[in-house]
């Protein structure tokens, strides 16, 4: 049996209660994230724009997962580390909306859940993992960025697996697979394929930016300590 | 625009051109994409899923469904359709981003 191994949950897989729950959860998060945009420095405006485009495109690179499914990376941790996890929430809110409306990728009813997984869980877990490793364990920034991206995407995948897997218990008729099937399926694809890819890409981008614009990193630190 | 943004913009351009890799690498995997329609899932689990049936097609106005021009099925056409989707998607994402920045921050910030 093959599984849905996509971070994008399509319409029909989540019941109305789950969908409504995530729209409710996302309202205050969206409010906070959009307001956060005011903290964006003028020089960061084009940077976040191009990173948003990067996130859209990087998700088009489907990678084969052993067992016959595919996975892709998201780019959320890159944005979180280079600018802020709130910036990543804004980016993914935009990207997932365009993907759902114009390309039928993801869903309308599941939109808020998808934004929560990829635009909140992923960048915040990725960012705080990175921050813990660099600040507490004094680990190398580039290695920490890679590990952060890995942990971020795997956590988001498990989160999606949980949302899918609780459906049979909540209300039958939607995603038919229980937790013991959906969580491992989501986790494994991201542990073996998307996770390592996210780690390498994130580490490479952070390495490049740190090398050519160390001031961006300094700026980020100041923004963070203030906010 | 600073050097990092310029480089990333160049990377975005290269990613658009090379985007067909994203479908060609997984060409034989296509039926396992999680793009299954309701009927396939119902067959696999051997039960009816009325909720999924009702919600699955709630939105069928996607202009480029599955990042392709409808009907462009072979590898070459699908690759071209994929590049078109990459261009359209990138343009839409950047447009919406600047619209949002303008809306929240006001005019001065989006230069």
Image (cartoon, grey):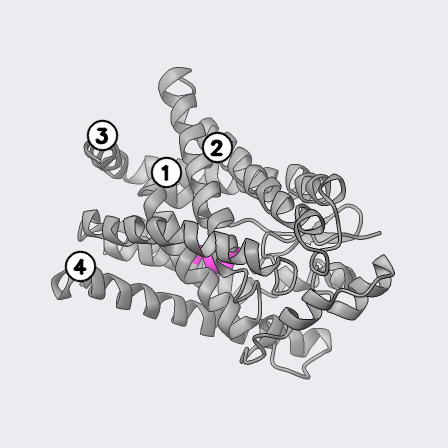
Would residue A197 be found to the left or right of residue A93 on screen? right
Question: Residue at image x 67%, y 51%?
Answer: A167
Marks 3 and 2, how far apart at CA: 19 Å
Measured as percent of width and height from the top left, residue A179 is found at: 71, 42
Q: Which residues are magenta?
A: A54-59
- In depth, the one of A41 and B101 nearer the eye is B101
Which numbered circle lies on residue A81? 1
Looking at marks 3 and 1 on the same chain, the residue that comes earlier in the sequence is marked by 1
The answer to whether residue A56 is magenta is yes
Marks 1 and 4, how far apart at CA: 22 Å
Marks 3 and 4, how far apart at CA: 22 Å
Marks 2 and 4, how far apart at CA: 30 Å
- Can residue B8 be seen here? no
Q: Which residue is mark 2?
A: A148
Measured as percent of width and height from the top left, residue A166 is found at: 66, 46
The answer to whether residue B61 is magenta is no
- Can residue A107 be seen here? yes
Measured as percent of width and height from the top left, residue A38 is found at: 19, 51
């Amino acid at each position: 049996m093959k599984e849905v191994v996509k971070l994008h949950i399509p319409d029909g897989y989540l019941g109305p209660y789950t969908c409504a729950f995530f729209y409710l959860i996302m309202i205050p998060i969206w409010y906070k994230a959009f307001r956060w945009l005011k903290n964006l420095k003028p020089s960061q405006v084009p940077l976040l724009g191009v990173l948003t485009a990067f996130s859209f495109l990087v998700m088009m690179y489907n990678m084969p997962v052993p067992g016959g499914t595919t996975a892709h990376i998201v780019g959320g941790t890159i944005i979180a580390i280079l600018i802020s996890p709130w910036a990543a929430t804004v980016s993914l809110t935009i990207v997932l909306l365009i993907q759902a409306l114009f390309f039928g990728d993801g869903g309308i009813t599941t939109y808020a859940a998808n934004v929560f997984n990829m635009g909140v869980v992923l960048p915040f877990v990725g960012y705080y993992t990175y921050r813990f490793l660099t600040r507490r364990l004094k680990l190398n920034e580039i290695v920490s960025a890679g590990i952060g991206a890995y942990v971020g995407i795997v956590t988001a995948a498990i989160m999606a697996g949980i949302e899918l897997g609780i459906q049979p218990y909540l209300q039958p008729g939607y995603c038919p697979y229980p937790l013991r099937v959906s969580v491992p399926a989501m986790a494994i694809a991201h542990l073996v394929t998307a996770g390592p890819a996210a780690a390498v890409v994130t580490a490479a981008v952070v390495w490049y930016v740190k090398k050519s614009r160390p001031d961006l990193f300094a700026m980020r630190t100041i923004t963070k300590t203030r906010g | 625009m600073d050097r990092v943004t310029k480089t990333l913009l160049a990377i975005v351009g290269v990613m658009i051109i090379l985007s067909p890799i994203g479908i060609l690498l997984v060409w034989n995997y296509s039926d396992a994409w999680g793009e299954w329609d309701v009927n396939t899932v119902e067959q696999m689990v051997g039960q009816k899923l009325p909720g999924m049936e009702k919600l699955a097609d709630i939105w069928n106005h996607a202009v480029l469904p599955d990042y392709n021009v409808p009907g462009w099925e072979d590898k070459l056409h699908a690759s071209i359709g994929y590049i078109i989707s990459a261009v359209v998607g990138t343009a839409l994402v950047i447009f919406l981003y600047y619209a949002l920045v303008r809306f929240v921050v006001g005019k001065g910030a989006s230069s």
